[in-house]
Amino acid sequence: MPFGLGPEEWAALRLSATVAFWCAAAVVLPGTLCAWLLARKQFVGKGLLDILLHLPLVLPPVAVGYLLLILFGTHGPIGGWLQHAFHIEIVFTWKAAVLASAVVSFPLMLRSARISIELVDRRLEEAARTLGASSLRTLLTITLPLSLPGIFAGMVLAFARSLGEFGATIIVAGNILGETQTLPLALYSLLQRPGGEGGALRLVAISILLSYGALALSELVAQRLRRVVGVER
Amino acid sequence: MKLELQVEFARPSFQLAVDLHLDGNALGVFGPSGAGKTTLLHLLSGLLRPRAGHITLDGDVLFDSARRIHVPPHRRRIGLVFQDARLFPHLSVEGNLRYGERLLPAGERRIRFHEVVELLEIDSLLKRPMQHLSGGERQRVALGRALLASPRLLLLDEPLSSLDHRLKAQILPYLRRVHQALGVPLLIVSHDLREILHLTDRLVVLDHGQVIGQGRYLELAQDPRASGILRTAGLLNVFRLRPVEHCREHGITLFAFADAPADAETVVASYQDGGMAEIDAVLRPEDIALALERVERISIRNQLPGEIVNILHADGRILCVVHVGVDLLVEITYQALETLGLGPGKRVWCLFKAHALQQLETAAPADAAQPAPPIPAGVLRQGPA
């Protein structure tokens, strides 16, 4: 194995990257939609919704994990239904790890998208309306393209948050070697084991590299996006 | 275009209540800043919703509070050119121009792309990134973008106020050209009388959210309610001049009033060699003097005979309306009025110096890329030879 990594460590690395990717993919649409609602629409209960959507940011991740376990467990209201209707099992699979990190990183996606939508000049949206664009078309052709840098930044945040997710994941996905054991979980397991310090250090190094790479890549993409979108901020 | 508008609109610090029945092809809304001009346009375009009232355009109900009708802006087909061009930064110039056009079914596109590009001379800009456009170019693209959505009515919200004087002179002819060539009804809002008068002399005067006058400019200037506001903005004579003869040796051009009857004997001359295009000239009422007869031994060559139509008194100032083929506003003092024994029906001569006559802009935008030349202009009376 290259870099002196064992197969377990490789599995953890691959799993972490996969989970983080799907987490970012999963939060982008609902996060942007909620961001648009909060940034541009007035409705009853907006304040309550705002707090509710931000809850995962302040709740202990273990509490989030436990809630998800109740909801998505094979006997839970959502998990039971998924099992029954589609034969899909969530808990203690890698999908649960995606679910856990998606829920925990949702507020980060939301905040980033919301700020960039709020920064889109409403007067441009007004101009689009007078040119014959419905509000949906205005959203799709003006607001979203112009807030793309912020939406992308939100995805990167979600990706990064997922790489570090521990508390909710261990509750809802477990710590199954090669199946749900992501980098932080593998690190934890190594630390529990006598003589695991060397492996733990290697995992720390990998984590740093991975995060650094992701952030650097995102900065590059963000720069390009800002140029394409024509916004210099 | 027939527009009926009876709306009430309220904001904590501002109230607007307007009742207007307008028809005609070009209308101006004049008023000081904060009069509610922009609000009025936003109500018309549907970006704002009135508290009560109704709006109909050519028989189509756009808003009716009693019947709970509020047609959303994108279904009104009312174009709006904003003060700040509001071009979409993520689209190319062509993308901007075609934004509204693309949303129209092909059968409803009355205005052709190449036609607009040609009229506004934006051919060379099409592939340029948005950031590299000058202020005047941006405003031209914005105008083209609004036109290509084939609006039934085009609203212009101080379209020139963000531009400097030179750029204004460049854009004005395009506005006029577009209006004449494409026949799109216009409603222009401005706090600058010149901009409006360049396109139309039919005005609505707005102040503090209320209509205080409506009609032709010269009528409004004589209307006690509206004239106050018009006066604070500075009254102007604006008329169109048609070149008759150009004398290259002396650098003068003889002009006739374009709107006067053909047999009007007055001919106007200007020192500029402006070619043979029609121009809009501006003359301030306080720059004209009145004489009871032609003055021979004087340097002023511009002497137009006419008849006093009306005399107005306001704030110790006297305003005469003199018909010299077109109606001219002339401001004189009370002493002059007394001494000369002026009154309606009296025949007088209007005198003014060459430099008092200013050109609104060069009417033909052929050399729009160059700054408009300074125009020392003068007017000559060419006696019946």
Image (cartoon, grey):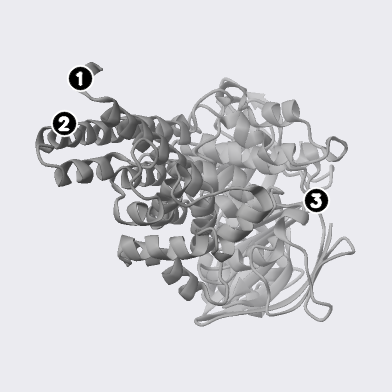
Q: Position of residue B290 (x, y in %)?
A: 60, 61
Instruction: State which quadrant residue A140 falls in.
Output: top right
Distance CA(mark 1)–CA(mark 3): 70 Å
Viewer-nearest residue: A12 or B265: A12
Q: Is residue B309 left or right of residue B175?
A: right
Q: Position of residue A123 (x, y in %)?
A: 53, 54
Secondary element at tag 2: helix
Could you confirm whether marks 1 and 3 are on the same chain? no
Q: Chain of mark 3?
A: B
Residue holding disc 2: A202
Q: Mark number for residue B152?
A: 3
Q: Position of residue A110 (x, y in %)?
A: 43, 55
Label 1 crowd bin: few (<14), some (14–19), many (20+), radius 10 Å: few
Which part of the image, by quadrant, shows the C terminus of chain B? top right
Q: Position of residue B297 (x, y in %)?
A: 54, 47
Name the residue at 69% across, 63% down: B46
As shown in the figure, which amino acid type bears the numbered disc 3? Answer: Arg
Viewer-nearest residue: A123 or B80: A123
